[in-house]
């Protein structure tokens, strides 16, 4: 009996994680923390400027250059054709809107559920939301035949009483995306105010002026903190349904249509899960670059990436579940055109995309991310995360231009071959996203220092008997 | 609202037994509606601009094989899938004529209507139109020349409908059956097409619409098209 008890007392759970690393429970002086964040922001070497110039050139040439070329000559310079009315442009649009779910998911959902490890990674993820929305929002304008008439879609009161058609999923799209862009921008700005004030007090020159303006006279008084916490909380709850609605509505662009392969009632959650899947893995890739280039190893530890990698694995499972559902029902339904689509994916021209998608979205995450060693290896995670981006892009490509190639009347079938203009514009928006992020990394503190500090203050480690236990104090 | 008796219900009857696949209707439509030709490369890419096309299907195996032709133009659906998806009401339903009309000036070119058309009859202006000499001399003044970035499709020659209506009004009479003759109907040497107002119970189309050979293309979709095909070959009984 006595022997049993002592064995029990000395028992260590084999997989018990020590939260010390995730929660950064090795505090350093506050000023040192501020400086870790501010130092890389002040430093912009030749490598940085070279990156900026290169990205700006790509944006100017590949995106805007080709866009003007397309405006001048017409949509015909792209590879789209009858019956494939939407091609690489709309696939890339859905891709970017998918990436935009990263920030809200990591930040708002983890905030609402009090996942404490989120603290250092929220801001970098939220910024991705805003920038990828900007990159994505270009496409609905760009893919128009007459982009100069885009304002016809806006409900502007006018003399001829012409309104936009609220029955059209494209009108819903417009409303959803503008709402999301607006709310996510406010949501990234609010928690930034104390950090901007911190930067204001430690900078000179134009930065000081900028931070003074943007920190809105923040002094750190108690009632300011009280209001800030309250507002962030309201926004965190409010932005979650917006996030779900945005990608559901994007999926309705397809699910509402009569096209075989599109008209599926599962598309809403399927797209939302796919968006979060690609979004969270994009956060991993971007955070790894940020950590490396800005020396933020103190804030971003391998335990954070491990936690995100677990999320990625869970969403890979969920995505595969929806994918299987969608596939099975099309196959079981036995409609002739539906079977043509499945053949197109398994053996036809879509096969390379289809197998790439399955490889990167299912095979690679399932084969690797169960291992703690892989989840804690930055290099492995970086490539797995990039692979998921490729896989999810393939998914969008298959669903949009891929499925449009097969119609009910076989006479109307057509093969879609994207042209350089389309690839170049898609790459141009990638460069735009990177450029915005690279520029912002020198102006916006990418780590919410005050939130990290708050986390450190609210957690303490106590020794109880032989074990060390982390205890939490509610600050609010 | 297919049941309304207000206005007209313009209807096309296509008798598949009569079609020889000669494409005269296609040429007539190009000439009447200022539809440009686009050249072999673009046609090879699936960017032919025909508002009406002859779909050819092979029936049987060589040597016991025969070609079947089916002219496909805009079906002028009563429940048109292209209409609700347009964000700017460019694709819109005319209650007066019971036609699906396209407002060129309003169209911003999202191509959503074309994606959602199960008949793939909507034609997009990929580039500015080009009429090689002397074709630019024969443009129809009653029809707009459409520029790049705009969706268009068969209108049932709405300019001819309007002209006939104006003439009838000027003469102070109602429209007679046969007053309106779209270009494809006029050009067809084998009289495949019959065009008229189905709301007029004594019209020829109202008669033919009751035929037991009649069917709609992709009828199961519930689009309720205004084009009625009469079965051809041996497949019909009576």
Image: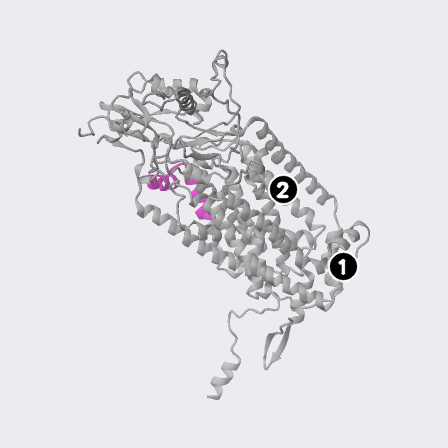
Whole-percent x, y for residue A416 in the image: 45, 33
Q: CA distance from mark 1 to mark 2?
A: 32 Å
Residue at the outermost bottom position: A2
Please name the colour scheme applied to the rendered image: one colour
User: Residue placed at 71% from the left, 65% from the top?
Assistant: A224
Q: How many numbered discs?
A: 2
Question: Label 2 belongs to which residue?
Answer: A432
Q: Is residue A51 left or right of residue B195?
A: right
User: Residue placed at 47% from the left, 84% from the top?
Assistant: A4
Residue A287 shows in this picture: no
Crowd around label 1: few <14 · some 14–19 · many ≥20 (10 Å): some
Residue B80 occupies quadrant = top left
Find the magenta span and give its range: A337-359
Residue B66 shows in this picture: yes
Tell me, for residue B67, which label it has, or none. Answer: none
Q: Are marks 1 and 2 in contact (CB under 8 Å)?
A: no
Q: Is residue B137 above or below residue A16?
A: above
Whole-percent x, y for residue A428 in the image: 60, 38
Residue A405 occupies quadrant = top left
**Label 1's element?**
loop
């Amino acid at each position: 009996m006595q022997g049993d008890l002592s064995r029990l007392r000395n028992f260590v759970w084999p997989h018990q994680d020590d939260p010390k690393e995730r929660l950064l429970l090795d505090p350093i002086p506050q000023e040192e923390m501020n400086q870790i964040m501010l130092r890389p922001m002040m430093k912009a070497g030749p490598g940085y400027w070279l990156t900026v110039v290169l990205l700006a050139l790509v944006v100017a040439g590949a995106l805007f250059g080709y866009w003007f070329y397309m405006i001048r000559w017409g949509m015909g310079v792209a590879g789209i054709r009858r019956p494939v009315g939407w091609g690489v442009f709309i696939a890339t649009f859905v891709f970017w809107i998918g990436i935009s779910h990263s920030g809200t998911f990591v930040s708002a959902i983890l905030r609402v559920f009090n996942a404490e490890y989120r603290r250092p990674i929220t801001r970098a993820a939220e910024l991705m939301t805003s920038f990828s929305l900007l990159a994505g929002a270009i496409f609905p304008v760009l893919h128009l035949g007459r982009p100069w008439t885009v304002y016809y879609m806006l409900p502007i009161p006018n003399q001829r009483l012409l309104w936009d058609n609220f029955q059209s999923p494209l009108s819903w799209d417009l409303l959803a995306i503008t709402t999301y862009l607006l709310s996510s921008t406010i949501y990234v700005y609010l928690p930034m105010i104390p950090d901007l004030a911190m930067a204001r007090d430690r900078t000179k020159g134009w930065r000081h002026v900028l931070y003074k303006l943007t920190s809105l006279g923040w002094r750190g008084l108690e009632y300011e903190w009280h209001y800030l916490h309250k507002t962030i909380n309201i926004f965190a709850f409010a932005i979650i349904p917006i996030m779900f609605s945005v990608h559901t509505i994007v999926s309705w662009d397809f699910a509402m249509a009569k096209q075989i392969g599109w008209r599926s009632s599962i598309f809403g959650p399927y797209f939302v899960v796919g968006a979060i899947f690609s979004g969270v893995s994009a956060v991993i890739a971007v955070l790894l670059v940020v950590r490396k280039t800005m020396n933020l190893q103190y804030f971003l530890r391998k335990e954070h990436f491990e936690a995100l990698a677990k999320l990625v694995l869970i969403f890979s499972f969920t995505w595969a579940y929806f994918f299987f559902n969608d596939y099975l029902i099309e196959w079981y339904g036995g409609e002739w055109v539906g079977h043509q689509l499945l053949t197109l994916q398994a053996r036809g021209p879509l096969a390379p995309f289809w197998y790439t998608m399955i490889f990167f979205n299912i095979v690679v995450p399932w084969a690797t991310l169960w291992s703690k060693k892989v989840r804690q290896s930055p290099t492995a995670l970086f490539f797995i995360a990039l692979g998921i981006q490729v896989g999810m892009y393939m998914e969008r490509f298959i669903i949009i231009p891929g499925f449009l190639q097969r119609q009910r009347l076989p006479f109307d079938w057509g093969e879609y071959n994207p042209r350089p203009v389309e690839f170049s514009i898609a790459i141009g928006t990638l460069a735009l996203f990177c450029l915005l992020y690279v520029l912002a990394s020198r102006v916006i503190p990418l780590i919410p220092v005050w939130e990290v500090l708050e986390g450190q203050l609210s957690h303490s480690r106590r020794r109880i008997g032989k074990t060390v236990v982390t205890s939490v104090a509610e600050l609010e | 609202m297919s049941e309304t008796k207000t206005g007209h219900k313009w209807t096309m009857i296509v008798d598949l037994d009569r079609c020889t696949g000669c494409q005269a209707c296609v040429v007539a439509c190009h000439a009447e509606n200022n539809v440009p030709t686009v050249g072999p490369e673009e046609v090879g890419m699936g960017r032919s601009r025909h508002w009406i096309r002859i779909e050819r299907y092979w029936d049987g195996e060589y040597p016991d094989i025969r070609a079947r032709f089916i002219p496909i133009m805009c079906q002028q659906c009563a429940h048109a899938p292209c209409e609700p998806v347009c964000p700017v009401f460019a694709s819109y339903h005319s209650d007066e004529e019971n036609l699906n009309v396209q407002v060129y000036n309003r169209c911003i070119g999202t191509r959503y209507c074309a994606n959602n058309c199960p008949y793939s009859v909507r034609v997009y202006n990929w580039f500015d139109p080009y009429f090689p000499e002397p074709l630019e001399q024969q443009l129809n003044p009653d029809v707009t020349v459409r520029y790049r970035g705009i969706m268009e499709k068969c209108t049932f020659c709405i300019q001819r409908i309007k002209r006939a209506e104006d003439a009838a009004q000027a003469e102070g009479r109602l429209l007679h059956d046969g007053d309106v003759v779209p270009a494809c109907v006029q050009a067809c040497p084998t009289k495949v097409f019959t065009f008229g107002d189905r709301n007029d119970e004594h019209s020829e189309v109202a008669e033919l619409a009751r035929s037991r050979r009649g069917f709609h293309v992709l009828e199961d979709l519930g689009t309720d098209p205004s084009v009625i095909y009469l079965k051809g070959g041996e497949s019909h009984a009576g």
